[in-house]
Image (cartoon, helix red, strand yellow):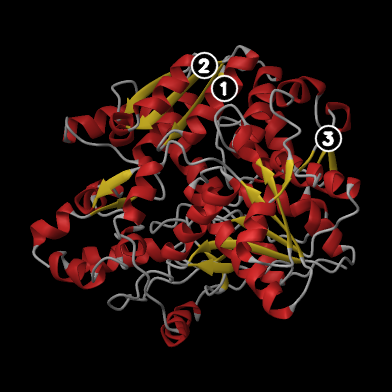
């Protein structure tokens, strides 16, 4: 009988996370004064043990036994050979995925929520706050806090709070206090409600509420938590790739291609960074972060120093970004935006260690539907981005007659995101391309910007 | 496209993960202005850049473009929000 799932025993789980900051050269994030941000600036927001991880240069960081104990609720996650998808594509490629949809909240998010809750508890924190949109991150943190007996407060954007009753029920079941944002509990919320008592809220307001609730708690026992972008989040997610390496070793396989969706970067980084380590040390491997064609921040935008806000309060950061003067032409506005991407992922793309790919909306959902009809799991829309490139690569392998090994991250299930599929089936999703000429024009705006060093990691 | 039709258009918000109307995107950004991703999200549906250019004051439109193009550095934003919150409550 053909083997489908490659499993690790619990005693084979990785005991250390991989910290990519030990192996890549990074330009530091700069403050408004042009100097690097210091750990003490983050102290009111995060516990110091997580701040230490945020800036750590240690290559391997021990995973505490208490964290492993909770992760074992669903980990090690299976590595699955996607035989039915392979068959449907008629490809000689061998396709594998890490099934991260099996966690209690249904995504990879608790891989960092659990250690974050643990380190907060270790630091003496009694209460954690966060914001959530549709509730994926909020549910992950609610679950994690429940495991460690920490109070969890989630500010959920009101429009989603009203639209997604199941997510708030999940959070309530895990004991979290999920309130619609804006709320009357913070000054930021009060101000928004004063302006418009019926406001549907926004992520910006919810983030402000969550941070305010943390930093203004006079007891000092509340901290804020974020589920993407930051270095310590990427670090915790590397358990995905570290498990995958062990699982592939068990069957004497090694991937030729690694693929993950790169929104904020954490599900991509989680799978890819341990293989980036191999690539830096000489392995031949292609690594593809995938993003929507509407905003290919890595594929087309130049690598520059830029501010995070128009008032220039926020630091200059080395990032893939376009400048301010560009006015998007009709039907070509997308594809030229910067949206938040982990700086480590940006750096790797800049160095050419990873190769960003962009996919279009319809292709994304076509891939998701094919995967659901073959492998059975309905993927999260984010996972569909990775799947679209997996299918491209598998078809390419067929054309070339190559037995390529493809590994990707099935980052979550889409069972609470079915409206996105409904829209696809209703034909509401269209594809339009961008021109390179417009990109060239856009890049001219950086003439006056300081340029980050094009650092190269020693290999 | 008439304003009413545009306002009623819906799509999945990649930040919220749920369906929202174009009208929401017009009002969910900083200071009740458009979301910084409005151009990103709607360019495949209609000529959103032209629509905004015609319906917003020129300075506000220029500001939107500038905001949309500049990266949101999370760490920097968090420090900034924390600082402002502490100032308000001190």
Labelled pair 3, 2 in contact (Cβ < 8 Å): no
Indicate left or right for A51 with A414 as reference.
Answer: right
- The residue pinned by badge 3 equals A8
Numbered disc in front, either 3 or 2: 3
The one of A399 and A170 positioned closer to us in this rendering: A399
Q: Badge 1, how many Cα within 10 Å: few under 14, some, many 20+?
A: many
The x and y percentages for residue A35 are 62, 55
User: What numbered label is drawn on residue A222?
Assistant: none
Q: Does A413 sit above or below residue B26?
A: above
Question: Who comes first in sequence, dot 3 or dot 2?
Answer: 3
Give the spatial CA distance, label 3 vs label 1.
Answer: 24 Å
Numbered disc in front, either 3 or 1: 3
Q: Does A357 sit above or below residue A120?
A: below
Residue at (79, 65) in percent of width and height: A256
Image quadrant containing the N terminus of chain A: top right
Asked if badge 3 and badge 2 are on a common chain, one would say yes
- The residue pinned by badge 2 equals A174
Question: Who comes first in sequence, dot 3 or dot 1?
Answer: 3
- Callout 3: residue from which chain? A
- Callout 2: residue from which chain? A
User: Which quadrant holds residue A323?
Assistant: bottom left
User: What numbered label is drawn on residue A143?
Assistant: 1
């Amino acid at each position: 009988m053909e083997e489908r799932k490659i499993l690790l025993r619990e005693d084979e789980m990785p005991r250390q996370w991989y910290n990519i900051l030990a192996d890549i050269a990074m330009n530091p994030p700069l403050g408004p004064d042009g100097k690097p941000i210091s750990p003490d600036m983050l102290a009111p927001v995060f516990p110091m043990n997580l701040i230490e991880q945020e800036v750590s240069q240690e290559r391997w960081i021990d995973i505490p036994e208490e964290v492993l104990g909770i992760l074992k609720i669903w980990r090690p996650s299976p590595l699955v050979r996607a035989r039915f998808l392979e068959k449907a594509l008629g490809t000689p490629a061998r396709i594998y995925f890490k099934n991260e949809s099996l966690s209690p909240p249904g995504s990879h998010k608790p891989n960092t929520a659990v250690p974050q809750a643990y380190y907060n508890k270790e630091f003496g924190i009694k209460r954690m706050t966060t914001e959530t949109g549709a509730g994926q991150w909020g549910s992950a943190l609610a679950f994690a806090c429940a495991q460690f007996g920490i109070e969890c407060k989630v500010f959920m954007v009101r429009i989603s709070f009203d639209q997604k009753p199941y997510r708030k029920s999940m959070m309530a079941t895990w004991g979290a206090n999920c309130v619609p944002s804006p709320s009357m509990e913070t000054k930021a919320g009060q101000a928004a409600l004063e302006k418009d008592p019926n406001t549907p809220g926004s992520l910006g307001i919810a983030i402000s509420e969550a941070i305010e609730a943390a930093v203004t708690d006079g007891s000092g026992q509340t901290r804020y938590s974020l589920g993407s972008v930051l270095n310590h989040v990427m670090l915790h997610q590397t358990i995905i790739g570290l498990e995958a390496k062990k699982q592939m070793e068990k069957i004497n396989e090694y991937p030729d291609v690694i693929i993950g969706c790169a929104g904020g970067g954490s599900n991509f980084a989680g799978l890819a960074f341990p293989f980036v380590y191999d690539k830096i040390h000489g392995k031949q491997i292609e690594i593809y972060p995938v993003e929507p064609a509407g905003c290919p921040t890595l594929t087309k935008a130049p690598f520059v120093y830029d501010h995070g806000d128009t008032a220039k309060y926020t630091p200059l950061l080395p990032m893939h970004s376009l400048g301010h003067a560009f006015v998007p032409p009709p039907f070509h506005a997308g594809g030229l935006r910067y949206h938040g991407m982990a700086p480590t992922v940006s750096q790797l793309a800049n160095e050419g260690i990873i190769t960003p790919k962009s996919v279009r909306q319809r292709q994304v959902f076509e891939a998701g539907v094919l995967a659901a009809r073959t492998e059975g799991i309905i993927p999260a829309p984010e996972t569909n981005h990775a799947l679209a490139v997996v299918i491209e690569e598998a078809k390419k392998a067929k054309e070339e007659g190559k037995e390529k090994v493809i590994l990707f991250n099935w980052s979550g299930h889409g069972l609470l995101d079915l409206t996105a599929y409904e829209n696809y089936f209703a034909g509401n999703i269209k594809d339009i391309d961008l021109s390179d000429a417009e990109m060239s024009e856009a890049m001219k705006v950086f003439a006056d910007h300081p340029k980050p060093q094009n650092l190269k990691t020693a290999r | 496209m008439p304003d009413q039709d545009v306002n009623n258009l819906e799509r999945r918000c990649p930040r919220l993960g749920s369906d929202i109307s174009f009208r929401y995107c017009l009002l969910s950004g900083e200071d009740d202005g458009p979301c910084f991703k409005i151009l990103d999200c709607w360019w495949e549906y209609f000529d959103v850049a032209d629509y905004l250019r015609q319906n917003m004051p020129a300075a506000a439109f220029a500001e939107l473009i500038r905001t949309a193009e500049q990266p949101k550095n999370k760490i920097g934003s968090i420090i900034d929000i924390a600082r402002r919150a502490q100032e308000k409550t001190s």
